[in-house]
Image (tube, grey):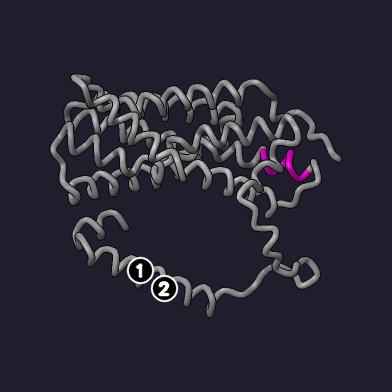
Amino acid sequence: LGPYIGSKLGGARSFAVSAATFLATIVWFWTKLPETLRKDRRKEFDITACNPLRFLALFKQRMTATLAATIGLQSFGDYMNTYDINFLYLNRVFGYDGAQVGNFATAVGVSQVINGELTKRLSTVLSRKLLTSLSNGFWMAAMVSLGTSKSVKQIGLALFLMAFGHLRAGAVNNYLQHHGQAGGMGAAEIEAAKANLTAMLKVFVPLLYGNVFAWATSHGRNLPGAPYFLIAGLTVLAQGVFSSVDPDEKAKRS
């Protein structure tokens, strides 16, 4: 709903409404949601623990390092990392303006909802490893379809394929929690380190895509879909890294 509402409001109004919504959310959480962490499990806030390299804790063991690397490579295709390049591509190839790109973002959101339901159903009949492999395959195909699209039908095909791949990191996250906790890390510590890793990537990945797009569309080159092909290749690499270990093996406890 966010991209759809933002595309209709447009400009400064969309940012103002977004800011007001965030503020209202903060107030609601602060006043309505109770603290669930037991007092004996709470720790004093330590500013020195706020380390931008916190994710390195995941790379002390081969299994957690492999799973973290898989998640990192998969995150190159996350929508937050592709938002800018989506605008550049859709504007250059289809002449879309901000509102039309917002409609595309809304369609991506719908495909995420569909993927949540599909993943829920498929997880009851498929192993986590197979589900991860299929999700990576669909996401790779979606990126190739989007990067070669010249018609609305091709965009529709890409959105259809996305509906099977958004949650490609879901099972990998579960494996990371399992092996990380066996190695002595806490659940929140693992989640924080993983979020730190993907946040660090989000700093430079959009810049990378912007430079790839600029190179691919300058000096006579006409490959506006190059960033999507890069994502497809990194998704294949993520699958290769994931397949290099057996995450179902017994976790090693420290």
Residue 129 percent across, percent down from the top left: 60, 28
Please tell me in which quadrant of the rendered image residue 232 appears: top left
Labels 1 & 2 near each other (Cβ < 8 A) = yes
Q: Residue furthest bottom?
A: 31
Q: Residue furthest left?
A: 95
Q: Residue at x 33, y 36 (%)?
A: 210
Instruction: Give the position of the C terminus as an image quadrant.
Output: top right
Which label is found at residue 19? 1
Tell whether 214 sits left or right of 92. right
Q: Amino acid at mark 2?
A: Leu
Q: Is residue 180 magenta?
A: yes
Name above or below for residue 236 compared with residue 159: above
Front one among 93 and 218 = 218
Please tell me in which quadrant of the rendered image residue 115 appears: top left
Q: CA distance from mark 1 to mark 2?
A: 6 Å
Per the rendered image, the range of residues in magenta is 176-181
* Element on which disc 1 rests: helix
Tell whether 161 sits left or right of 133. left
Q: Is residue 11 magenta?
A: no
Residue 123 percent across, percent down from the top left: 56, 37
Tell whether 35 sits left or right of 153. right
Q: Main secondary structure of the magenta part?
A: helix
Q: Residue furthest right?
A: 254
Q: Amino acid at mark 1?
A: Ala
Q: Which residue is mark 2?
A: 23
* Element on which disc 2 rests: helix
